[in-house]
Image (spheres, rainbow, N blue to C red):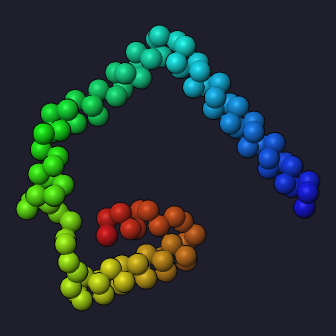
């Protein structure tokens, strides 16, 4: 048992060291930083454009999140959870692809 623990700790330290080296390579290289900034533009530009609408969207009357649940919503959520658990348990996959559309 002790050998397994040591092996897992060694593997996690090696992985953390690799991640740190890769992060430092990206930060120190201006070309990599430019590529990273260009990749972030499609995410940042819409966020800036809609920043003024966020308070209204989050807590306004047009917000999607229901403030109360009725029994239909509760039992529907239970049914979706049971179905997703059974399906993913039978096929041995993660439940994200079942839960997300539901």
Image spot of residue 68 (x, y percent): 20, 78
Q: Up-down: is 52 above or below 92? A: above
User: Residue at (22%, 36%) from the top-left corner?
Assistant: 47
Image spot of residue 8 (x, y percent): 79, 50
Q: Quadrant of residue 49?
A: top left
User: Residue at (79%, 47%) from the top-left corner?
Assistant: 9
Left or right: 6, with 91 as reference point: right
Q: Up-down: is 71 above or below 88? A: below
Image spot of residue 42 (x, y percent): 27, 31
Q: Is residue 46 visible?
A: no
Q: Nearer the viewer, residue 46 or 82?
A: 46
For the N terminus, the quadrant is bottom right
Q: Is residue 25 visible?
A: yes
User: Residue at (11%, 51%) from the top-left corner?
Assistant: 56
Image spot of residue 64 (x, y percent): 17, 63
Q: Nearer the viewer, residue 84 or 71?
A: 71
For the C terminus, the quadrant is bottom left
Count of marks overlaid on the render? 0
User: Residue at (22%, 80%) from the top-left corner?
Assistant: 69
Left or right: 90, with 3 as reference point: left
Left or right: 59, with 32 as reference point: left
Q: Up-down: is 12 above or below 63? A: above
The residue at the far top in this view is: 30
């Amino acid at each position: 048992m002790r050998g397994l623990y040591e092996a897992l700790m060694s593997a996690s330290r090696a992985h953390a060291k690799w991640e740190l080296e890769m992060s430092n390579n990206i930060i120190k290289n201006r070309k990599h930083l430019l590529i990273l900034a260009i990749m972030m533009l499609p995410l940042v530009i819409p966020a800036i454009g809609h920043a003024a609408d966020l308070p209204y969207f989050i807590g306004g009357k047009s917000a999607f999140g229901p403030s109360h649940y009725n029994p239909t919503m509760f039992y529907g959520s239970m049914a979706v959870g049971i179905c997703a658990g059974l399906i993913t348990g039978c096929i041995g996959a993660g439940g994200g692809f079942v839960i997300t559309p539901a």
